[in-house]
Image: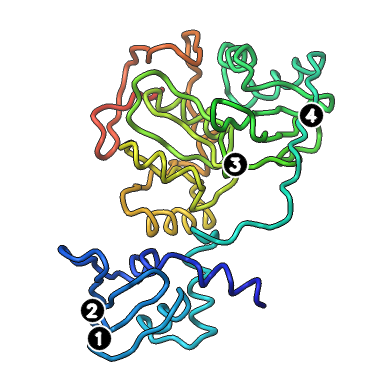
Amino acid sequence: MRDRFGPLRKIPLTAVLQACGARPDRYDQAKWHTAEGTVSITGTKFMNWQRSQGGGGAIDLAMHVNHLAFSAAVRWLERQFPIPPSASPDRAAPRRLSLPPPDPNQLPAVTRYLQQRAIPKALIHSLVESGELYADGRANAVFLLRGKENQPVGAELRGTGPVRWLGLAPGSRKNLGYFSLQNPGVTVIVLCESAIDAISCFLLHTTCWAISTAGARPNARWLPALLAQGYLVYCGFDADDTGENLARQMMAHYPVIRRLRPCLHDWNDVLRSRPQPTLPLSLRINPSPLSQTQKLPGEKKILLHLP
């Protein structure tokens, strides 16, 4: 049980206060205004001078502000922070990345599969030429996750045979990087659940930077660095219970993030419901003039491939 409680206690107190709806003081960064009165925080300690109560760690704070028993506070924190912001890293040595070797003979099968998912052959070719996509010996589509200095830190694997499946290459460290597509000069980021959804979103919203989180999760470690650069970020997770729940958690932790919900289950479903692009596409082209446009909230113009 100690392993369960340890990471929860180390959640930053400011994150807990934000999740509780507390407001930071305008003049004193250590003070927060809660329904229980003004709380002062110093590192992992907090004090409510109006009630002469204090404590240490996120569990104590959740109990105090939300009037919860210990077990209820633990469950509340686990719902709010499925991946604790500053949980202690696993002390075991990280597993070494093992990318599957490329097999060019299987590339036609991967290409056919992606074309069945309404991804144009020209874009598939661009991804292969740029090294972001390849086929392995089992005809899996391999989408590389890139980290610092554009180095591979993992890969999403998508089965293209009779048994369709989705996984990660052994040793992948998806908190260190991601698969993404963008055109030059983008200011909008859309976070998607998978590489195929990111590609589909890129084709639908050609002026966005489409990033795969390699599975729906609310708090990827690379996300704060992107937010700090001033991008307008949308959570584009699937329109299902899991996607909605994790999108709410992400927006609770990062209030600047907005929801962009696909009109069908996911972005690839939306792409397959629309006519195919007629012009060749590549990773670095400028958006092509299209017959119709749609605006996203807070963005000037997003080009869409609409009927």
Residue located at (41% from left, 46% from top): 224
Q: Which residue is mark 1?
A: 49
- For this view, does 113 lie left or right of residue 47? right
The answer to the question of whether label 1 and label 4 lie on touching residues, with beta carbons closer than 8 A, is no
Q: CA distance from mark 3 to mark 4?
A: 17 Å
Using the image, tell me which numbered label, if any, was put on residue 100: 4
Q: Are marks 2 and 1 in contact (CB under 8 Å)?
A: yes
- Front residue of 87 and 155: 87
Query: Is mark 3 in CB contact (under 8 Å) with mark 4?
Result: no
Label annotation for residue 239:
none
Mark positioned earlier in the residue sequence (1 or 4)? 1
Q: Position of residue 49 (x, y in %)?
A: 25, 86
Label 1 SS: loop
Residue drawn 36% across and 65% down? 14
- Measure how far apart labels 1 and 4 are at the Cα level: 58 Å
Q: Earlier in the sequence, mark 3 or mark 4?
A: 4
Q: Quadrant of residue 142?
A: top right
Check disc 3: other Cα within 10 Å, few if <14, some if 14-19, many if 20+. Answer: many
Say what amino acid the circle numbered 4 marks: Pro
Q: In the image, 90: left or right of 63? A: right
